[in-house]
Image (cartoon, rainbow, N blue to C red):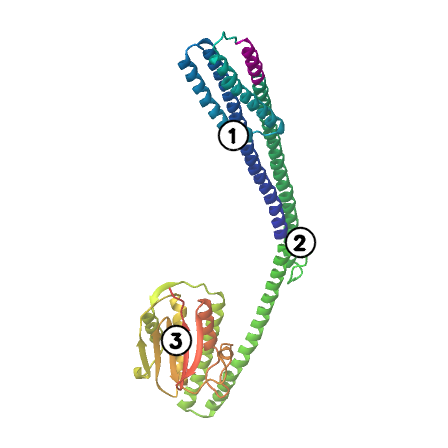
Amino acid sequence: MTIKQRLYISFSLILFILMFIIGVFFYTIFNLNEVHNSQKHRYDQIRRVEKLKEYNNSFSWIVLDIITDFEKMNIVNKRLQKADELFENLLLQKKDTINNSESMKEKENLELIFLEFENTKKLIKQELYELVLKKEEKNFNLFNEKYDQINTLIQKLLIEEIAYLQDELNKTEKNTENFIETIKLELVILLLVAIILSFIISGKIIKEIKDKLYKLNEGVLQLFKDDENSIKVDIGENNELSEITNNLNSYLEKQHEIIHSREELLRNISHELKTPITKGKFLLENLKNKNESSEISNINRVFLDIEELTSKLLEREKLNFATLKSSEFKVSSLILEALSKLAIDDESKIKLEIKNDFYILADKYYLTLALKNLIDNALKYAQDYPIEIEAKNNRLNVKNIAQKLSNDLIYYIRPFTREPNQQSGHGLGLNIVNKIIQKHNFKLEYYYKDSHNIFSIIFKNN
């Protein structure tokens, strides 16, 4: 298992614990909200039952007023009318109060209370009213006994109901406190577990990384001993550090290949130099017996050829280690700089067309060298003149009238490659051009159109 995978698993585990803590937090909020609603419900129910006590007291005052002023029918009628209003309001409250009961016991108790209120209504509306209307002497003792009995029962039932509701409310508050304390403890434990777990996991991963880095360092130190060219250390498979080791080994192998490639290049250079040197020796032998200026000119060309080859090889080698110094300049400036470095005997051989003079961000020295080589090749191998240099839409095209190349561009950008029938040149020009273009992350293209070989440098938009 890689270190990255272990980190992902560890992070997922800790994240799961944190999500669980968040879940507990929201669960707590939800439950506390439910508890709050339940408490509010019980407070409201207590207020409803307290209101019933007020109704009961009001009925007692009505009865007292009727018995005291039974001879004054207007007062009696007003009190009976008041009783009717209270009974109507009580009837409206009955449904709401019973429906909000939370247990069968509470519901039965409330139904019994309202039944006794019905009895109170009958007692006041019927028996008390009939006593008041009697002509003979009135005796309220029996009525008072009945009413006191019902009133006492209602008071008792109301007190029991309020006590029951208050007891349930106290239980809810106590359960809420216990619930909050439990949740606090659980959250603290979960946080501690998450912190301890993160320390253990991170410590273990850090120790593993340190051990692997130590082994990797030991492997790197092997490179300085006994001409080693690869790291030989076992730090396990399927982890990032083993990937680093493999990549480093790949890099060392690539470096070995580069060295081998340079050795091969030097052999090629040696081979290329042998021909002009042999020619020079032959011509010098002829000069011993002849005194001809043409021979001297030929020798000069041979050594100029050697000089040109040497110059191109140095430029090519410098490119491998060159650091680009970028600046912004116009394409017209680049073209003029490249043309100034060429010895052009007839300006009519070149047609210049700048359709839009765009800006380029690049190393002007190396880009001038690349364009100079392209123009030089176009002039050297053109079958007819002029050659064309065209700048437009972030492209710089160099065109000449000539036979289509027999191979793709990839063939000619390799060092020491040229057309089979080509005698002049060393096959390094396009290789140098391609290296410069690649270093700038630009693009070199070749295509053949309307009897023209066209080489294009495609610039990135600035």
Q: Residues within 10 Å of mark 1 (few under 14, many from 20)?
A: few
* Foreground tag (3 vs 1): 1
Q: Which residues are magenta?
A: 140-154
Residue 259: image quadrant is: bottom right
Question: Of helix, strand and loop, which mostly describes the magenta segment?
Answer: helix
Q: Residue at x 49, y 70 (%)?
A: 317
Task: Please tell me which of labels 3 and 2 falls first in the chain.
Answer: 2
Q: Which label number is shown at residue 1?
A: 2
Q: Which residue is mark 1?
A: 96
Residue type at mark 1 is Asp
Q: Which residue is mark 3?
A: 372
Task: Please tell me which of labels 3 and 1 falls first in the chain.
Answer: 1
Whether residue 310 is visible, yes or no, is no
Viewer-nearest residue: 173 or 155: 155
Residue type at mark 3 is Lys
Whether residue 25 is visible, yes or no, is yes
Q: Residues within 10 Å of mark 2 (few under 14, many from 20)?
A: few
